[in-house]
Amino acid sequence: MIGLWYEDHALGQTAELGAHRFSREEIVAFARRFDPQPFHLDEAAAATSIFGGLCASGWHTVSVSMRLLVDWRRARREAAAAAGETPPPLGLGRGVRDLRWTLPVRPDDVVGFTLTFESTRELPRPEWGLVGMRIAGVNQDGRPVCAYTLLGLAARRPA
């Protein structure tokens, strides 16, 4: 199991965050609220677009990955607490880089998300370290649909 502290993050370590099925209704509801472009809202308009059919907003796809990441982290913290450990303070996001949407997510696609630790860096504040996590989404056919690197603060173990 991947630990909770900065020192526990080894480069190349991976974790399955979970999978999500994108329904037509959910795609349209997200688009209406946050990304109201025709190819996210209407099948007829989407058919004439570059996508050739209705697809989820890339922001929807990334938002789902964030939800799965938060749920995964919460479960790890709860497991540590149940084992009598004191979880570290929560860090915060410091940015995203190299965000790519490589394939449209269609209604009824099931996208599984994984996390891979790709970098760590000590910071001037000794109680925190910076961790780079690559998040990748792959559809039910094994084809990549999105990927990005999330930079976040992780608490360092007290001396």
Image (tube, grey):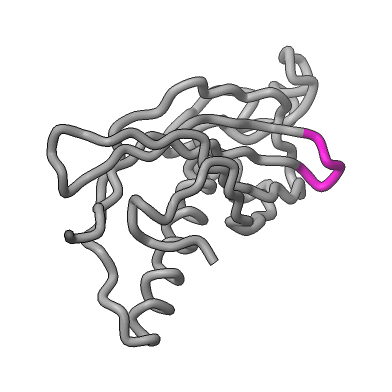
Q: Using the image, determine if residue 146 lies above or below residue 137.
A: above
- Which residue of the protein is positioned furthest toward the front in this rendering? 159
Q: Decide which of 139, 85 is in the foreground and name it.
A: 85
Which residue sits at x=68%, y=46%? 24
Please provide percent x and percent y for residue 44.
75, 26
Please provide percent x and percent y for residue 122.
27, 36
Image: magenta residue range: 139-143
Q: Using the image, determine if residue 59 lies above or below residue 6.
A: above
Please provide percent x and percent y for residue 125.
13, 39
To which quarter of the image does residue 41 belong?
top right
Q: Decide which of 143, 89 is in the foreground and name it.
A: 89
The quadrant the C terminus occupies is bottom left
In the image, is 79 to the left or to the right of 126? right
In the image, is 139 to the left or to the right of 29? right
Q: Using the image, determine if residue 145 lies above or below residue 71.
A: above
Q: Using the image, determine if residue 6 lies above or below residue 130.
A: below
In the image, is 85 to the left or to the right of 125? right
Q: Main secondary structure of the magenta part?
A: loop
To which quarter of the image does residue 61 belong?
top right
The quadrant the N terminus occupies is bottom right
Which residue sits at x=63%, y=31%? 146
Which residue sits at x=59%, y=42%? 12
The stretch drawn in magenta includes residue 57: no
In the image, is 7 to the left or to the right of 26? left
Which residue sits at x=46%, y=47%? 66
